[in-house]
Image (tube, helix red, strand yellow):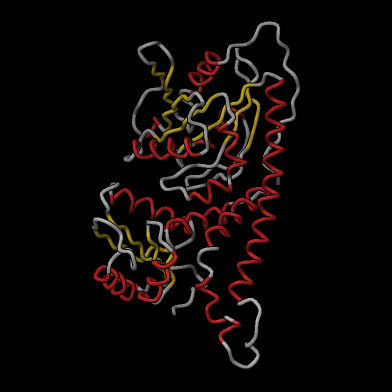
Amino acid sequence: MIERRSGGDRALLVVLDFGDADPGERLVEIQALAVSAGATIAGSVAGRRQRPDAALFAGKGKVAEILSRRTESGADLVIFDHPLSPAQQRNLERALDCRVVDRVALILDIFALRARSAEGKLQVELAQLDHLSTRLVRGWTHLERQKGGIGLRGPGETQLETDRRLLGIRMKVLRERLSHVARQRATQGRTRRRAAIRTVALVGYTNAGKSTLFNRLTGAKSYAADQLFATLDTTLRRIFVPGADTIVLSDTVGFIRDLPHDLVAAFRATLAEAAEADLLLHVIDAGAPNRDEQIAAVETVIAEIGAQAVPQIRVYNKIDAVGLAPGVERDESGILRAVRVSALTGAGLAEIRNALAERFPATAGRHAVPVPIQTAPA
């Protein structure tokens, strides 16, 4: 087995075309994910199949090709841009004689690197343990106490059973802590609703520019970078919009195609900010070549967290990169549906504020009630 190198992993990427997405765009995205996780790209292998192979996912012939490319490139890690079953992962590691990481584990690894707050770390750990729980046999089969031998005979748990039990205990503790966080958020949400404060959540595909837009609108200094999943922790800030009710804006974690269900479940307390908002600003990279697929992926996650009924305005961001002018788009009834902006240059921000004032006009005679706005716990 090839060991992990101290200077970082050399990764060979595998992207198979099952007819569900553009393989070229999938390759670009998995490359960005791998680099975000700290890997060096050693090469890639593409292929086309009608359906995954039950044992090896890619089939014997393609796995032989991957092994050859791995040997030639000196890669010590193979990353599949697809979710793998525990059996498929074990079989591939034996066949390729190296570590194999699927898309789910790669995204979880990036989240682990990015988590800064106590809540974020709890959420990522729970998702990782949930994913690991079905794969424990990989690391523990050689430690079975019941297989016999001096000092290993007799009743009692196998090492695998012990590890699963301890894992279950840890996951229960994490769920209880996150449940407490969820109750705190629900209490804060009720307080804001009683004070008639409007809540607006920024959602969108990862790296669409949500945090940059958040900083522009609020004057905050949230971390923003040209990288996938730069923001994990939800941040809330009041924004002043002339002619509008008091508004609190929240910046949420970015979504991505095939976002792991374990991750969505673990981040449910955080994502509740979007599900309970009065309005979603769906931030879209106007110049993304697979823009429609990114929009569909975000809509899928929005539905998964129960936010599909929340009113939505699309914000087409990065118009400076594609030569579009700032402005608004309305439907046949005159209802505002989209705004074109550049969070980087500030173009179109006035249109967003006008859109919020149109959606939430100031209530005559109502006085704002001070409400503490809490960001993610440090």
Farthest residue, direction front: 155
Q: Identify the residue shown where x is 42% and y is 56%.
A: 103
- Quarter containing the N terminus: bottom left
Residue nearer the viewer, 216 or 336 = 336
| Quadrant assignment, res 341 | top left
Residue nearer the viewer, 96 or 35 = 96
Percent position of residue 361, x then y: 58, 11
Percent position of residue 92, x then y: 37, 71
Farthest residue, direction bottom: 150
Q: Is residue 21 above or below residue 235?
A: below
Percent position of residue 246, x then y: 65, 19
Residue nearer the viewer, 80 or 324 = 80
Q: Identify the residue shown where x is 33% and y is 67%.
A: 56
| Quadrant assignment, res 59 | bottom left
In the drawing, does residue 322 fall left or right of residue 175?
Answer: left
Percent position of residue 184, x then y: 72, 38
| Quadrant assignment, res 41 | bottom left
